[in-house]
């Protein structure tokens, strides 16, 4: 009987392990293998660290890398800053129908694909776009203004795309905070800020961290938004990886970049967990 | 009554299943090509004549090579890379299969074009491609707003600040090199010389960067920018200019004084093609003059089919003649095969232009 | 001489939610240092009233004064009243000591002073060594004490308690009742305690307000409410009672005789507030312990002028609180009668027919308001 249930347990786990092995572990090992070789002649390859040294020698690559990391962190912070009050409002201020309605409003942008969403922003921000025309109509500007093709436009697009992934864990974690506890803080003399700082934010920390991890990973790995909304100076590391793989046929350098991006995101997530004194398990459970 | 309904349902699902399975068993040609090169009506006609289904996947040069490289040349039965991108890719990645020219009706091709393509796509004595569609890239200009734009380097004019768009891709590098009085094709074989040439182009593009509104990535996005007037001068394909010309007389394709860049898209067999016979049948089918004219109407570019001109659309012919007077046509710079490894040099130049402030 | 301080006064306080009246014209005064309970069934408005005193809700009209100062418009964090929540609402993200220190920190008390006062507060609830524990490490009773200590360390004028014993098991609840009462008399802070459990209110309070449908039915000492209920609601809600409905047939000297049905007539005290007339319907209440069992139903007793025959349905043994469940033979009404465990009634059997009797003095009649 016991042996049978154990067999059943392993059978249940098999698809997961297969998925992990075939689609996660093996491709990464393969990628590492490609990253550690160099083309010596047509169809000839040799083991080499040259792709990694290339990354550090060429300022363009590591600058793009740093820029992507910093912009992703800023985008994550902005998303958190905007999503937190929204989530608090949804979780704690609203009841019943208006609550689900607002939650739904956060969800609506995700009924269309990322491409369509990004094109939506392009329609709004471009020189002949809605906002530019509205500003002219109001007389606030004298001629057309270009709001597209700069880092601010990228930021807007990234934050917009990430909102829901921050709101969902935050609403969940804030809903689990009993109203009593917030009232108790006021009752004991706390004001809005001290209550937020001492009660709400410590309680919401697992949700904040898990939201930030998801948003950071998504932003770091985003390709479309920085590419379409960013201007002639926009540089994004995933774009660099794409370029290496697709237009330069340089799988070796592309793989090396991929490995580096993986290391970077792991490092930043690890640092984030350390700084907030959270563990990955507590965060994922929220 | 109910019983009858049930029977009907069963019957119809059986018929459906039969149709579905017959669709699966039917002969199929998997074609990896450019948008517009295999219009639905042509596919329909081909199926009627041969019983072969054509499954089209739209792509571009780099994507075609990447896809085939990833699969070792399988997944498709016929592909259409540009002629300059065949031998380099073959040398490096071994993704194509030599053509059996005896299966091709040589008489349906414009002879000079067929010969040129054969020469350009020969590696170690094997011919890999035959020509299909040709065209050029040059300038698409709103002549009312930017009438002085005659050559690639005119896109740097400060008067056009914020009204210019081009791609950060190799045609831009080549075009600027010609406009700067150099001959990049002649330097193809000499890595050192080519690198030096490219750094000159890099300096020029960096200098021109403030004038640029955005480096376009998708053809449709560029057409929208031109349509709305946000961009008045750009570097693009001839068809894009002619398409806009139908909507707005001021916008058209201009062959640059240093010469438009000519390309020829080919028919090439992937190394692991599963239906070579169908591929040859398709090539011979679409090279018939009437069919070729149909494809010209859909793609906007002319084909290498002998005699197809007679069936081509008059508007397009007029537009072509307006953009290409005799001397401009003679001045077209046809892309020679790209030697393996050039992409790496060009790639770094493009990266640095993009990163420049 | 009448210089007793009033810690809390409410004047004609009203609160409505839409069409629903939660609190209806409530006025009360609570003396300094007293243990005051508000007793009522759930939904009677007692929690709303308490939340208005704490400042979480504002009354629609009326005034709330703490030691003579109006609290209208004063937010909860500025009121000299602290609350022990129903589920205690301890802060799980802080240690025990941090919980107790929280209010002092908000007041910007010096760190050394905070440590001293927190230690004193923890000592006073016998949890002096638990300061570094997490909240989750405490037992139910310990959490209770921390919740109270967290408020008392602030030396509030009023301590509001919202059914804090509700979540405890029975044994601990009984224990905490006594402990709370003793704690209150030791610290001398005015406690306002709301509950739906009459035994909690009766055991602990100096005064109780019985609340029903948003209004106070009666305010008085526990024994007042028990022995001299002024409304039918109080009589039925405070303590156990047997109840009939009857029609008044005779009135004399504050005593009425009322007919329940043919052959069953009861005599009892009329509530002095009711202007009763012959023919009016009344609710008749008698407590289980006021009823005497006359084992032999033939013997007569003039003192116990209310007398009925019953069949014993069941004997409910519960130590000192044992009762007999009887069915009265005429109206078929079920009655509870206290069974003092003196051995006197040990012979009682199920199915036996017995006679019970009780004194009109301990029978209360209230006019039925239609």
Image (tube, rainbow, N blue to C red):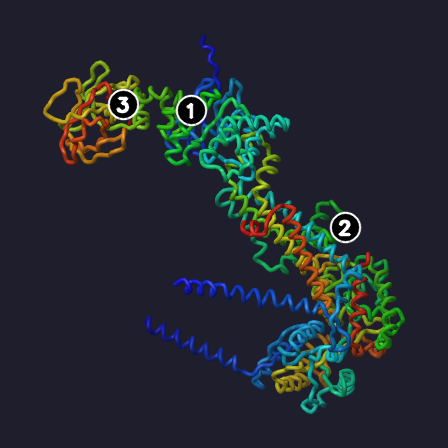
Badge 3 marks a residue whose secondary structure is strand
The residue labelled by disc 2 is A143
Tag 2's secondary structure?
loop
Q: Secondary structure at mark 1?
A: helix
Residue at position x 58%, y 56% in the image? A110
Question: Between C18 and B338, which is closer to the camera in this rendering?
Answer: B338
Which of disc 3 and disc 1 is earlier in sequence?
1
Residue C91 appearing in the image: yes
The quarter of the displayed image where residue C291 is located: top left
Q: Which residue is mark 1?
A: C181
Q: Residues within 10 Å of mark 2 (few under 14, many from 20)?
A: few
In x, y percent, where is residue A138?
Answer: 71, 45
Looking at the rendered image, the quarter that the N terminus of chain C falls into is top left
Answer whether labels 2 and 1 touch (C-beta < 8 Å). Answer: no
Tags 1 and 3 on a common chain:
yes
Mark 2 and mark 1: span between their CA atoms? 78 Å
Give the residue pinned by disc 3: C366
Residue B61, by quadrant, is bottom right
The outermost residue toward the right is: B181
From the viewer's side, name the closer residue of C367 and C94: C94
Q: Give the x, y percent position of residue A71.
A: 71, 52
Q: Residue furthest top?
A: C1
Q: Is residue B319 left or right of residue C67?
A: right
| Outermost front residue | C129
| Crowdedness near tag 1: few (<14), some (14–19) or many (≥20) residues, C-alpha within 10 Å | some
């Amino acid at each position: 009987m016991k042996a049978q249930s154990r067999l059943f347990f392993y059978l249940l786990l098999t698809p997961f392990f297969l998925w992990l092995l075939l689609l996660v572990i093996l491709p990464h090992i393969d990628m590492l293998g490609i990253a550690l070789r160099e083309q010596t002649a047509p169809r000839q390859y040799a083991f080499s660290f040259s792709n990694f040294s290339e990354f550090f020698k060429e300022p363009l690559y590591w600058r793009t890398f740093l820029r992507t990391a910093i912009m992703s962190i800023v985008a994550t912070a902005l998303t958190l800053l905007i999503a937190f009050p929204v989530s608090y409002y949804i979780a704690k201020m609203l009841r019943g129908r208006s609550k689900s309605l607002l939650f739904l409003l956060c969800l609506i942008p995700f009924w269309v694909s990322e491409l369509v969403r990004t094109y939506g922003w392009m329609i709004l921000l471009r020189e002949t776009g809605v906002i530019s025309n509205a500003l002219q109509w109001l007389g606030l500007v004298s001629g057309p203004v270009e709001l597209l093709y700069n880092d601010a436009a990228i930021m807007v697009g990234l934050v917009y795309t990430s909102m829901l992934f921050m709101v969902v864990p935050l609403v969940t974690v804030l809903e689990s905070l009993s109203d009593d506890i917030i009232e108790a803080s006021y009752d004991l003399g706390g004001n809005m800020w001290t209550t937020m700082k001492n009660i709400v934010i410590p309680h919401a920390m697992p949700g904040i961290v898990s939201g930030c991890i998801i948003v950071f990973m998504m932003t770091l790995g985003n390709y479309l938004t920085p590419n379409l909304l960013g201007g002639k100076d926009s540089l994004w590391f995933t774009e660099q990886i794409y370029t290496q793989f697709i237009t330069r046929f340089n799988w070796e350098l592309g793989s090396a970049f991929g490995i580096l991006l993986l290391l970077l995101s792991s490092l930043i997530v690890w640092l984030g967990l350390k700084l907030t004194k959270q563990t990955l398990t507590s965060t994922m459970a929220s | 009554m109910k019983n009858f309904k049930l029977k009907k349902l069963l019957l119809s699902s059986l018929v459906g299943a039969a149709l579905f399975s017959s669709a699966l068993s039917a002969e199929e040609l998997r074609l990896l090509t450019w948008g517009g090169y295999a219009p639905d009506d042509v596919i329909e006609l081909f199926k009627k004549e041969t019983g072969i289904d054509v499954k089209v996947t739209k792509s571009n040069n780099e994507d075609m090579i990447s896809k085939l490289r990833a699969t070792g040349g399988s997944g498709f039965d016929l592909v259409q890379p540009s002629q300059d991108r065949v031998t380099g890719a073959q040398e490096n990645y071994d993704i194509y299969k030599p053509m059996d020219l005896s299966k091709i009706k040589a008489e349906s091709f414009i002879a000079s074009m067929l010969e040129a393509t054969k020469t350009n796509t020969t590696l170690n004595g094997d011919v890999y491609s035959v020509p299909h569609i040709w065209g050029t890239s040059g300038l698409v200009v709103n002549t009312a707003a930017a009438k002085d734009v005659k050559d690639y380097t005119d896109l740097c004019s400060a008067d056009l600040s914020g009204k210019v768009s081009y791609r950060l891709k190799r045609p831009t590098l080549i075009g600027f090199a010609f406009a700067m009085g150099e001959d990049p094709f002649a330097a193809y074989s000499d890595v050192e010389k080519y690198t030096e040439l490219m750094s000159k182009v890099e300096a020029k593009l960096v200098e021109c960067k403030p004038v640029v509104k955005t480096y376009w990535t998708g053809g449709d996005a560029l057409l929208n920018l031109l349509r709305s007037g946000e961009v008045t001068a750009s570097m693009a394909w001839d068809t894009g200019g002619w398409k806009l010309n139908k909507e707005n007389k001021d916008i058209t394709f201009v062959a640059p004084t240093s010469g438009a860049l000519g390309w020829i898209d080919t028919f090439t067999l992937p190394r692991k093609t599963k239906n070579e016979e169908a591929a040859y049948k398709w090539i011979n089918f679409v090279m018939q003059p009437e069919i070729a004219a149909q494809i010209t109407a859909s793609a906007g570019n002319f084909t290498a089919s002998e005699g197809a001109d007679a069936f081509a659309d008059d508007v397009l012919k007029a537009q072509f003649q307006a953009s290409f007077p005799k001397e401009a046509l003679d001045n077209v710079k046809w892309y020679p095969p790209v030697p393996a490894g050039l992409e790496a040099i060009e790639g770094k130049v493009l990266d640095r232009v993009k990163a420049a402030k | 001489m009448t210089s007793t301080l009033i810690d809390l006064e409410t004047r004609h306080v009203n609160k409505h939610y839409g069409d629903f009246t939660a609190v209806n014209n409530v006025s009360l005064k609570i003396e300094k240092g007293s243990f005051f309970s508000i007793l009522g069934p759930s939904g009677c408005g007692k929690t709303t009233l308490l939340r208005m005193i704490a400042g979480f809700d504002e009354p629609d009209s009326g005034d709330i004064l703490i030691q003579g100062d109006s609290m209208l418009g004063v937010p909860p964090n500025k009121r000299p009243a602290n609350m022990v929540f129903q589920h205690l609402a301890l802060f799980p993200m802080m240690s025990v000591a941090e919980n107790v220190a929280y209010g002092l920190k908000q007041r910007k008390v010096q760190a050394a002073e905070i440590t001293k006062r927190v230690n004193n507060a923890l000592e006073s609830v016998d949890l002096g060594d638990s300061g570094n524990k997490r909240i989750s490490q405490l037992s139910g009773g310990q959490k209770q004490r921390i919740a109270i200590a967290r408020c008392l360390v602030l030396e509030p004028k009023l301590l509001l308690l919202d059914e804090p014993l509700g979540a405890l098991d029975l044994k601990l609840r009984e224990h905490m009742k006594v402990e709370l009462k003793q704690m209150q008399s030791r610290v001398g802070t005015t406690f306002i305690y709301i509950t739906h459990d009459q035994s909690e209110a009766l055991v602990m309070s100096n005064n109780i307000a019985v609340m029903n449908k948003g209004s106070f039915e009666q305010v008085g000492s526990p024994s007042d409410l028990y022995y001299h209920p002024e409304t039918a609601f109080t009589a039925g809600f405070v303590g156990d009672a047997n109840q009939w409905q009857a029609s008044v047939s005779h009135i004399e000297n504050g005593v009425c005789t009322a007919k329940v049905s043919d052959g069953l007539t009861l005599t009892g005290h009329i509530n002095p507030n009711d202007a009763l007339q012959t023919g009016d319907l009344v609710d008749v209440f008698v407590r289980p312990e006021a009823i005497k069992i006359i084992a032999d139903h033939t013997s007569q007793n003039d003192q116990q002028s209310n007398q009925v025959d019953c069949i014993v349905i069941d004997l409910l043994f519960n130590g000192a609180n044992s009762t007999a469940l009887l069915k009265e033979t005429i109206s078929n009404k079920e009655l509870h009668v206290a069974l003092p465990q003196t051995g006197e009634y040990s012979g009682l059997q199920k199915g036996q027919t017995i006679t019970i009797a009780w004194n009109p003095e301990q029978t209360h009649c209230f006019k039925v308001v239609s």
